[in-house]
Structures are given as C-alpha cells and as structure tokens.
C-alpha cells in the first residue's frame, strides 16, 4: 500500500510539473498573465496640462517580451497608451537581475476631468497584445497647479535681451571710435571691478545662510568635525576601537549636531522655534568623545583652516556652540570671497563665470561650513595667476609659482578630480631652471604623498565590497567594461536629468528641489551667458592658454565619473553611482576661465556694465527662487 501511495504521489507531481511548464510557455502566457516583478512609482493627474502621467518598472519573466502598451481603466477612464522605455539602474540591484536595466517605463495621456480620478487599473501588454502583468486599484495623486511659472521665463528672456543689447552697444561704440591700446594687461581691473562681483556672491551666501539651518549641506556634519579636529592640532584621523577613522570632539558640539540630524533626507521633516532656541543654548562642555568621520580622511585639511580657527576662537571665548558654528560659516565664506576678489583683480569675470557662481547650488554650498566655497575661490585665484603670467608674456616670479603651487595643492588635495590643475605650476616654468622645475613638480609630489598617506591611515567600516585597488586592477584588465558603464551612465535619461537639476540646485541633502520652471530658465541663463562671453572674448591674444584651460576642464569633468566608479560604485553595478551635478561646477569654472576676457578698447566699460547688471539681476533671481523654497522646506 505504501508503494502504491508513493507511486501515486510521483505521478501527481509529474502531472503538476507538466501543467506548470505548459502554463509558462509563451502561448499560454497570452491568456494567463504571469506575476513578474512590477512597481508603479507614480501615477499622477496634472490638471494644469490636462494629462495623466505614470512611471515605474516591469521585469517580465521572458526578457524578449518587453511591455509596449498599458491599458488604463477605471473611474470613468479607459485608454490604451504607448509606453516609453526608461533605463532604470536601480532595478537590477533591487531584484538581482542584470538584464533588468531597461525595465523602466513611463507614459502620459490626455485626461480632462474636473477633479482627481479615483483608483485606476493598469494592464501591461507586449507588442503582440499579450498580457504581461496587471495591477488593480492604483491611487492617483493630484499635481497642484503651478502659478507664476512665467516669471522664470521673464527673467531668462530679460537677461538674454540685456546681453544682446550689450553686444549691439559695444558694436556701435567700436565703429565710432578707434580702439587705442592702453598698455594694461587684459585681466587688470580696478578694485571696484573685482570687489562688486565678489561681494555679490558673498552677500547671496550670507542671506541664504541666515535661512538654512545648520548642517544642511551634504556631509557638513563630517566637515565640521574635521575642522574641529584641526583646531586641536589633529591633521590626520585616528582609528577607534571599531577600526573606523575619526577624532575627538567636544560633547557640546555633538549635542548641538544632534538637534539637526533628523533633517537630512527627510523632505517632510521640519524644525520648530523651540528646537532652534534649544540648539542656540548648547555650550562647550570641555569633555570629549570619539566621532567617526572616515569620509573626510582623504581631504588635505588646508581647506579647513578658516573653520578651524573660527571654532577655536568661539570655544576659547566661551561663546555658544551655535555662535562658533556660525562664525565658521562666515569665516569660510569671507576667506573664499577674498580669494575670489584677488582672482578678479587679475582676471575680470565673464557673464558665464558669474552665472556659475550665482547658481542656487553654488550659493547654497557657499553658505555652509564645508569645503566648496574655499575650493572655488582657491581654484579661481590659481587660474587667474597663471593666465595673467601667460598674457604678460614674461617669466613669472618664483613667488608667483609658489603661490600657484600652494593654491593647487590645497584644491587638489580635497578635490582630486581637479588633478589636471597640477599642470599649472609646470606650465609657468620659463625659462627652465633647476629650482623652477623643482617648484613646478613639487605640488604633484605633495598631493601624491598625501593620497598615499590618507589611503594608508583612513579606516572605513568593514564592507564586503572590493577595495579601490582591487577595482582598479579589475578594470585595468577589462577597460571595455569601464567604457560600457560610462556610456550607460551618460545615456540614461533620468540620470542625466538629475545631473542637470543638481548642477543648478537640488538643495539640502539632495532633498529640496526648486520649482521645475527654474531649471529650464537657468539652462537658458547659462547658455546665453556662455554665448555672450564667447562673443566678446579677445581671441586675438593667442589661443594656447584658453586651449590648455579647456583641456584641463574636460579632463577634470571626465575624472568625476571615473573616481566614483573606483571609490563608490559596486563592481556589478550597470551604471556609475554617486554622481551629482555639483561635482562639475569646478570643471565648468575652469572652462569659464578659458574664455579670455578684458579687451582694452572703448567698449570695456560697456562689457563691465553688462556683466554687473547681469550679476545683480541673477543674484536677485536666485534669492527670490531659493529663499521661499528653503523656508517651506525647513519651517513651513
């Protein structure tokens, strides 16, 4: 009897296996949809545009049968809509299938209804009309009607008109008058020519910093801790018992930071008046605890000197921790503005450079206590010193080479993707002398030594992921995979759109977006400023220096994804992770420096006036756009 029962069980199992195989065949799937991995990320009704939009991803069991259309039904809605494919790098990592990179979809269809529709049913079909998957009762979100989007375009078009009018005026003036040379260098300008643009950038940062709560710039907690380590004379990180690098910070600073740790990455989180007042009463304790900050271990701490001095002064004076932090913010911004002022004395800023410096993202980062403002100011000064010597045609002094070398070391030591700037001291070697060659090569040696020391002394939490050196060896043996990931990264539409938005400004810890119209308007502002700067540039003084600056800008931009591929991206990721648009600001500024400005002709005053007017209006526009967003994000 037991043998008969076992035999029956085997036959039943065989029959079930055959039925399962038949149901999973391609022909059977046309009538009985499977349940593949599926997600509806958003389904929204936009009454302003009169349309329904959906976005998500679907990974069919058979990769050859991709979703082509979606049937939308329910709540008085019935439509068959074509799907647009979307590359989704997050899906392969989420479900563990390397063939799911192209699993994303989105659609839009006209939907004119007076109010938000009820839940809808979605049925996904392949090209042959077979049902791949379906999901029922998906809630539809209602997009609020945006008012005032036209003002962004008004500002962009107004600035375009101003720049065009400046071109016409300078053309008319040059036709009336001869252009006698004055014997002054192209980049020279009076104090006001340099002071006003630098003051505009600093003023915008101070206003934004007065609204933004502390520690809202990405990784600002770690940056302030690293500045405090330096204030105590600690240049290198130490290692804790958990084998993680960091240092000792005052308990009062830790308590102060705890008041703001709930804000990052939580767009719905707000800070109330009582919480702010309580944070302002935190005092320095005089006792210390170990704080982990391994992410800052690779930064040469020269860029933390202003913040370190400010924190030390605040602590010794007995001021509150909040006062010390605010002083660190101000010290970083003021020193960076002074570096910018010194740069503008030697190289008059173009409209394109001012547009980059006044973007919401730049101003927001300038207002924090991190390293962005100082790296920007130091980069601009180093480039202006080099360009001034190139324009003069005379051999630069040893003191100038030393100044450029120190600035380059400070910048590249914390922004390794700007390594091409290490060429600046080398390019200034004329005539060739042994001591000049040593000065020119010394920055590269210092930065290289620092990288080796930092890699050897910095300890991260134990991860199963391969080390940077292991990845380097793997990619060196398979360079084609690097090109594939790089190409997939730059051709993924949702990623490139994020790069553009985060270049202009996704504030906070990438959790505070600006109005959608702002990004389009800023694209027009940057494009028109670049075109105007190229049109009025003095290309007759030689193309060697601009060409070299252009090469350094492109090389720096390419190093951004390559560094993140080695240091941040998992080895099996289909695209490069961690890229943000703000990482390309410094390469863009190097590109702006490649444009020769400052003609010595009667139209010079017109050019300066146009840039000044452009800067003032752009600064006001940035504040009018940014401040309401920050108030709503943190206090609304």
Image (spheres, rainbow, N blue to C red):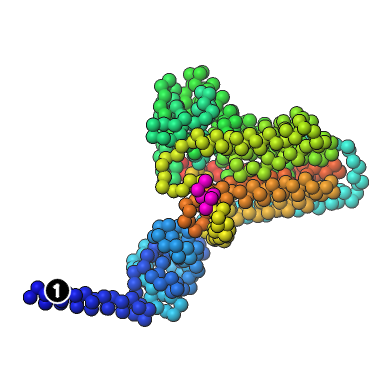
- The image shows residue 579 at horizontal and vertical percentages of 54, 50
Q: Is 40 in the magenta?
A: no
Residue 212 in view, yes or no = no
Residue reaching furthest to the bottom: 27
Observer-nearest of 628 and 406: 406
Q: Residues within 10 Å of mark 1 (few under 14, many from 20)?
A: few
In this rendering, the answer to whether 550 lies above or below 32 is above
Q: Is residue 584 left or right of residue 178?
A: left
- Quadrant in the rendering for residue 67: bottom left
Residue at the spot 45% in from the left edge and 65% down from the top edge: 99
State whether the magenta stretch is mostly helix, strand or loop.
Answer: helix
- The image shows residue 431 at horizontal and vertical percentages of 82, 36
Residue at the spot 65% in from the left edge and 55% down from the top edge: 524
- The image shows residue 545 at horizontal and vertical percentages of 77, 45
Q: Which residue is mark 1?
A: 6
User: What's drawn in magenta, residue-wise?
Assistant: 469-474
Q: Is residue 440 left or right of residue 92?
A: right
């Amino acid at each position: 009897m037991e043998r008969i029962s076992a035999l029956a069980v085997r036959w039943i199992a065989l029959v079930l296996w055959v039925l399962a195989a038949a149901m999973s065949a391609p022909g059977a799937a046309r009538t009985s949809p499977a349940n593949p991995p599926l997600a509806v990320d958003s389904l929204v009704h936009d009454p302003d545009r009169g349309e329904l939009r959906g976005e998500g991803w679907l990974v069919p069991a058979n990769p050859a049968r991709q979703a082509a259309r979606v049937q939308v039904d329910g709540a008085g809605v019935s439509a068959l809509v074509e799907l647009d494919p979307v590359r989704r790098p997050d899906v392969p990592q989420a479900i563990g299938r390397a063939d799911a990179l192209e699993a994303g979809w989105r659609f839009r269809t006209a939907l004119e209804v007076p109010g938000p529709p009820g839940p809808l049913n979605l049925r996904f079909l392949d090209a042959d009309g077979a049902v791949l998957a379906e999901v029922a009762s998906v809630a539809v979100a209602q997009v609020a009607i945006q008012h005032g989007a036209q003002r962004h375009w008004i500002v962009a078009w107004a600035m375009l008109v101003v720049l065009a009018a400046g071109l016409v005026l300078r053309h008319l003036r040059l036709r009336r008058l001869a252009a006698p040379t004055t014997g002054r260098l192209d980049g020279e300008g009076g104090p006001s020519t340099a002071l006003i643009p630098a003051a505009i950038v600093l003023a915008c940062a101070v206003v934004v910093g007065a609204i933004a709560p502390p520690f809202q710039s990405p990784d600002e907690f770690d940056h302030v801790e690293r500045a405090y380590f330096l204030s105590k004379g600690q240049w290198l990180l130490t290692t804790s018992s958990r084998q993680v690098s960091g240092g000792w910070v005052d308990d009062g600073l830790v308590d102060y930071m705890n008041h703001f740790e709930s804000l990052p990455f939580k767009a719905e989180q707000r800070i109330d008046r009582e919480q702010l007042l309580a944070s302002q009463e935190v005092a320095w304790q005089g006792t210390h605890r170990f704080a982990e900050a391994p992410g800052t271990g690779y930064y040469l701490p020269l860029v933390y000197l202003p913040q370190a001095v400010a924190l030390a002064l605040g602590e010794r004076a007995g001021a509150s921790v909040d006062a010390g932090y605010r002083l660190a913010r101000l010290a970083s911004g003021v020193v960076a503005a002074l570096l910018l002022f010194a740069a503008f004395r030697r190289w008059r800023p173009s409209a394109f450079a001012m547009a980059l410096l006044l973007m919401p993202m730049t101003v927001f980062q300038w207002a924090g206590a991190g390293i962005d403002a100082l790296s920007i100011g130091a980069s601009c000064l180093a480039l202006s010193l080099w360009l001034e010597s190139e324009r003069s045609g005379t051999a630069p002094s040893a003191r100038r080479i030393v100044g450029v070398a120190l600035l380059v070391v400070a910048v590249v030591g914390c922004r390794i993707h700007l390594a091409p700037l290490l060429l600046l001291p080398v390019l200034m070697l004329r005539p060739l002398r042994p001591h000049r060659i040593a000065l020119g090569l010394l920055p590269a040696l210092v930065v290289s030594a620092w990288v080796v020391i930092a890699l050897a002394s910095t300890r991260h939490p134990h991860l199963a992921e391969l080390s940077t050196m292991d990845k380097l060896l793997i990619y060196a043996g398979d360079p084609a995979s690097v090109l594939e990931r790089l190409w997939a990264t730059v051709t993924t539409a949702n990623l490139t759109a994020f790069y553009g938005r985060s270049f202009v400004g996704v504030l906070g810890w990438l959790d505070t977006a600006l109005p959608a119209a702002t990004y389009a308007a800023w694209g027009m502002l940057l494009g028109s400023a670049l075109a105007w700067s190229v049109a009025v540039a003095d290309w007759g003084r030689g193309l060697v220096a601009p060409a070299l600056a252009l090469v350094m800008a492109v090389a720096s931009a390419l190093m951004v994804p390559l560094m993140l591929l080695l240091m941040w991206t998992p080895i099996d990721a289909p695209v490069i992770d961690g890229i943000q648009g703000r990482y390309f600001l410094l390469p863009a500024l190097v590109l702006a420096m490649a444009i020769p400005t400052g003609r010595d002709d009667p139209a010079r005053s017109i050019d300066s006036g146009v840039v000044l007017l452009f800067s003032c209006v752009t600064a006001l526009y940035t504040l009018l756009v940014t401040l309401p967003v920050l108030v709503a994000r943190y206090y609304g």
